[in-house]
Structure formats: C-alpha cells, structure tokens
Image (cartoon, grey):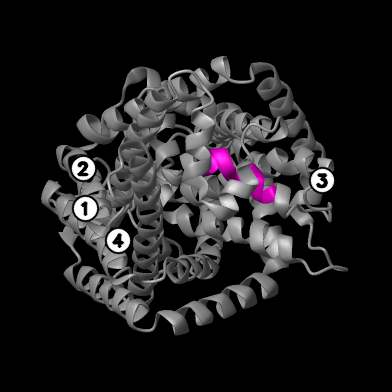
C-alpha cells in the first residue's frame, strides 16, 4: 500500500507563529492580559456552569452504558493487544495526568479545607472531613469518563471504520464531511495544537518551579532562570530521546519506570507514615464521595455566590475537557486490539483507582500531619509555598532527605513521559492520512519535542503570566465540548449502522473468533460488516 501520510506544514507554521506571538504578547502586555483572562474566566465559568456540569455527568452515564451494552464487545482491530494490560494502563495514565499531580497530591486537600464546597463552613472539622473526598471527586469517574468519551469515537474511527488520519479534524471529516484540510478542519486542529502547547507549558513550568525550589532547599543551588532552564533541558533531552526511539523502546519503558517509582514512593509513605489513618480516611473519603456524588456533580449553589462550583468543579471539568483530545489521540495509538469495554473501564476504573491510590496516601499523610500539629500545611502553603510544605512533610519520615531526592527524580521522569505522550499527539495531528500501524517519523517527533521545550523557556525568560495561558487553555474547552459531542454523535450513528441489528452474542463471537485465529489484515477486513469492508477496499 502506498504511503500517503504527509506533514501539514501550513498548520505547523501557523501554530508556531500564533504560540510564540502569544508568548510575546503576554510578556509585553502582562497586566492587561491578566485582567482580561480573569474577566473571561469569570464569564465562562458563570455562564456555562450548568451546561458543563450536565455534560460531565452525562459522560459518566453514556460511557457506562456503552461499556455494558452489546457494543462493548467490539474490538479496535482484530489483532492481539500490542501491550500488556498493566503497561497499557500505565501509558494512558501518564498521558492524562501531568507531573504536577505529584505536587498537588500532598496539598490538594488543604485548598478544600480552606474553601470547601456544599456550603460547608471553612476550616472546620466538617471541612476537613470533606477535603480529601472532594479531591477524590475531582479525580474520579466524572473526570476519567471525559477521557473515555473522547477516546472511544476516535478509536472506532481509526480501527473499525479504517478512516485515515489520527487527528480531531480527521474524525470530524468522517462524521460531518467537512474536509480535514479545509477551513473547519484546520480550525479544529489549530485549536487542539494551541491547547496542547498551553497545557504542557503550564505543567512544565509548574514542575520546573517546584523542582528548582526543592532542589534549592536540598543543595543551596540558587533558584534562578538558569537553574530552571537547565532542569527543563535535562527533562527535554530525556523525553526527546524517548520520542525519537519510538513507543516500544521509549514511552513504554518510561511509563513503567515512573509508575513503579510512584507505587514504591507511595508504599514507603504508607508503611512509615500514619498507616491506620491513611486506610481509615481513604475509605471514609471514598464513602463520602460516593454518597454525595450527585450533590457534588450538580451543586450550583443557586442561593449563594456559586464561587466554589465555578472556581473548582467547573474549572476542573473544563481543564479535563481541554486535555481530553490529546489523551484520546494517545489512547487510540496504544489501544489496538482492545475492546470498547476494555478502553472505557480501563480509563474510568483503572484511572480512578490509580488516582485514589496516589492521592489517598499522599493527601492523608499530609492531612494527618496537620491534624496532629506536626506540619501546618495550609499556613505554609499560604506563606512560604507548597514545596516548603512538601519538604517538611517528607522530613517527618525516615530518610527524609533521600525521599525528597526520590521525589525529584520521579517528578522529572514523570514529566518526560507526559511530554512524550503530548509530543506524539501533536506530531500525529500535523501528519495527514496516518493509517493504522503508522506513526509520525522520528524527525517529526523530535522537531515537536524541541518546539514544546522552547515555549516554556520563553515563558520563564519573558516572565509572561502563566495564569493567563492557563485561563486561555481552559476557555478552549468550550469548542472542544462541541467537537466531543459531534464525535459521540458519529460513534452512535456508526454503531447503529454497523452492529445495530447484530445480536450481542454474535458480536462477541465475531471478535473472539478473530482474536483466537490471529487474522491478517485481509482477514480483518473480511470479518467486518460487509459495508465497512467494502468502503475500506474502495478507499484502498
């Protein structure tokens, strides 16, 4: 088969021009941009509170229905899965969770303690009781269902329908007919690329700042621009090498290293920290989150200010939505051979379990230290910074200094793995007509690795306000909601066309048979519904 994949140079050039122009504009008009971003964020979160809450809750309902319906048996390709289940979960977990989550893992509860939801008085025993529960909610089924809702249609488009192109524009073309290279397609991909640059820049800058602050506490190395750049470049070399050598030798190994490192780090804290409190409060928090799930999901505070819902829940959902397309592209790449049910449940169940495992141990260790007067986390967070609080927390444990070094190493490798996943999504978007089994060239991935590194360095150098980019990234979630709904409509239409009249046991039998016989590509086409195979052969 002739390779028709080509680099979309106009899209790449336009994206980079807008990104670097935006950084320059933020540096020159920093005060004005901060005010504008705050105004826009306030308007977006106020006006779209109810639609965002409903969209997110419906994502959970739809994904669970999809997983347990007859369509859950449908596999993305007839080949065996490329990666073991554990490695597969590790890879997409790191694609969706930035390295800054390690930082927030110690501190998230403190924010909810000081600004609780559900009209609970701040800094009270009730606020403390719900602090970890709200963290579990914001990293729970609602969040991960957004990723699943975005991923499944793209997987179906790519592996079952055999449509060319691993990008948002490609699936929009398949659903609506608007060409990926036309104005609509270009706009969709441009929004995606700008959002990815913004999101990764925020994660990288926050991680670099945290890393250099803790490094300065440990070694006395001055926390300067040069130090931050050195850290960014070191991490970037690691993720550039990972991206260049490919998925199997790079991202796969990085994800395994990071996840086993996080598990070991968390288990150490669990064993040598307040084990009983961690177990008890994790279970209690899960219970609170579960019993108050609908309240938390639909709490708008109509008789109050609604500030908590806007500043926390709506913001979080918009942040997850803005990240979802990039995660979906990466999930699609690594999910060949998996079923719809596997993808949905892996994202929601495994994603929640991993988040709650990490946050349950780290947050409850931190909360217990505050409760017993060992480290006043909220006060330190407000006066000295979160990295100081983390340092004092880890020093409570045996070999605290060594543990802080381990924290830094894990964070650096975590960031490299996350950047690798984002870099793949960006490079795939800028290559037209990618087909199943194809990846962007190593040189293309390396180019985008370099570009993704230069932007945060430029942000730090120019002292451009990070909050402005954060607000802009979140605001782009609004058009992504429309894109996700279009994808979902396309998925439902395709499922009805392809398998609507096929009994559940026949769908299961079809894909089990294909799996056991290890069909070739030609066999896979033959195993598809007739009209899908015909369309595929026609395109060939």
Task: Check disc 2 and report the residue beneath it.
Answer: 243
Closer to the camera: disc 4 or disc 3? 3
Kind of element beneath mark 4:
helix
Q: Furthest residue to the right?
A: 303
* Circle 2 crowding by C-alpha within 10 Å: few under 14, some 14–19, many from 20: many
Task: Check disc 4 and report the residue beneath it.
Answer: 456
Which callout, 1 or 4, points at the residue further toward the start of the chain?
A: 1
Asked if labels 4 and 2 touch by Cβ distance under 8 angstroms, the answer is no
Task: Check disc 1 and report the residue beneath it.
Answer: 449
- Residue at x 51%, y 82% (from the top left corner): 36
Magenta span covers which residues? 104-112
Kind of element beneath mark 2:
helix
| Cα gap from disc 1 to disc 2, whole angstroms | 8 Å
* Circle 4 crowding by C-alpha within 10 Å: few under 14, some 14–19, many from 20: many
Which callout, 1 or 3, points at the residue further toward the start of the chain?
A: 3
**Image location (x, y in percent) of residue 436:** 27, 43
């Amino acid at each position: 088969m002739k390779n028709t994949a080509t680099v979309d140079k106009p899209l790449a050039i336009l994206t980079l021009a807008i990104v670097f122009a935006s950084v320059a504009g933020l540096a020159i008009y920093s005060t004005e941009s901060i005010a504008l971003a705050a105004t826009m964020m306030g308007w977006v979160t106020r006006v779209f509170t109810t639609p965002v809450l409903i969209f997110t809750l419906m994502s959970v309902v739809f994904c669970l229905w999809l997983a347990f319906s007859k369509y859950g048996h449908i596999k993305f390709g007839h080949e065996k899965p490329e990666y073991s289940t554990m490695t597969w979960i590790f890879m997409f977990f790191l694609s969706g969770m930035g390295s800054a989550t390690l930082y927030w893992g110690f501190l998230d509860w403190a924010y909810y303690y000081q600004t609780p939801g559900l009209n609970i008085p701040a800094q009270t025993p009730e606020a403390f009781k719900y602090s970890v529960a709200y963290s579990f909610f914001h990293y729970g089924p609602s969040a991960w269902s957004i990723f699943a809702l975005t991923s499944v249609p793209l997987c179906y488009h790519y592996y079952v329908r055999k449509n060319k192109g691993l990008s948002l524009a490609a699936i929009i073309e398949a659903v609506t007919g608007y060409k990926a290279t036309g104005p609509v397609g270009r706009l969709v991909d441009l929004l995606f690329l700008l959002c990815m640059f913004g999101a990764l820049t925020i994660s990288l800058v926050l991680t670099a700042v945290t890393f250099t602050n803790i490094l300065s506490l440990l070694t006395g190395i001055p926390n300067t621009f040069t130090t931050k750049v050195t850290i960014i470049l070191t991490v970037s070399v690691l993720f550039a090498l990972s991206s260049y050598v490919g998925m199997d030798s790079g991202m796969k190994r990085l994800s395994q290293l990071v996840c086993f490192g996080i598990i070991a780090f968390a288990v150490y804290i669990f064993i040598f920290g307040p084990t009983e409190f961690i177990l008890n409060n994790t279970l209690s928090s899960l219970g609170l989150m579960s019993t108050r799930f609908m309240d938390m999901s639909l709490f708008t505070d109509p008789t109050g200010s609604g500030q908590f819902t806007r500043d926390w829940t709506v913001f979080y959902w918009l942040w997850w939505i803005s990240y979802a397309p990039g995660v979906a592209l990466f999930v699609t790449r690594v999910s060949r051979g998996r079923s719809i049910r596997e993808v949905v449940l892996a994202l929601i169940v495994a994603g929640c379990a991993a988040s709650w495992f990490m946050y349950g141990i780290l947050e409850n260790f931190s909360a217990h230290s505050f409760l017993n007067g060992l480290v006043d986390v909220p006060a330190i967070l407000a006066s000295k910074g979160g990295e100081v609080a983390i340092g004092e927390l880890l020093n409570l444990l045996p070999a605290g200094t060594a543990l802080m070094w381990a924290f830094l190493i894990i964070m650096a490798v975590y960031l490299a793995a996350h950047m690798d996943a984002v870099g793949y999504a960006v490079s795939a978007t800028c290559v037209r007509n990618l087909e199943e089994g194809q990846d962007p060239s190593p040189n293309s991935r390396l180019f985008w690795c370099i570009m993704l590194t230069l932007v945060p360095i430029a942000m730090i150098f120019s002292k451009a306000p990070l909050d402005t980019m954060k607000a802009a990234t979140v605001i782009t979630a609004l058009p992504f909601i429309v894109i996700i709904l279009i994808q979902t409509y396309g998925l439902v239409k395709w499922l009805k066309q392809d398998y609507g009249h096929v009994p559940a046991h026949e769908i299961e039998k079809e894909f089990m048979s294909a799996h056991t016989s290890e069909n070739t590509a030609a066999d896979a086409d033959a195993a598809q519904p007739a009209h899908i195979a015909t369309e595929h052969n026609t395109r060939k």
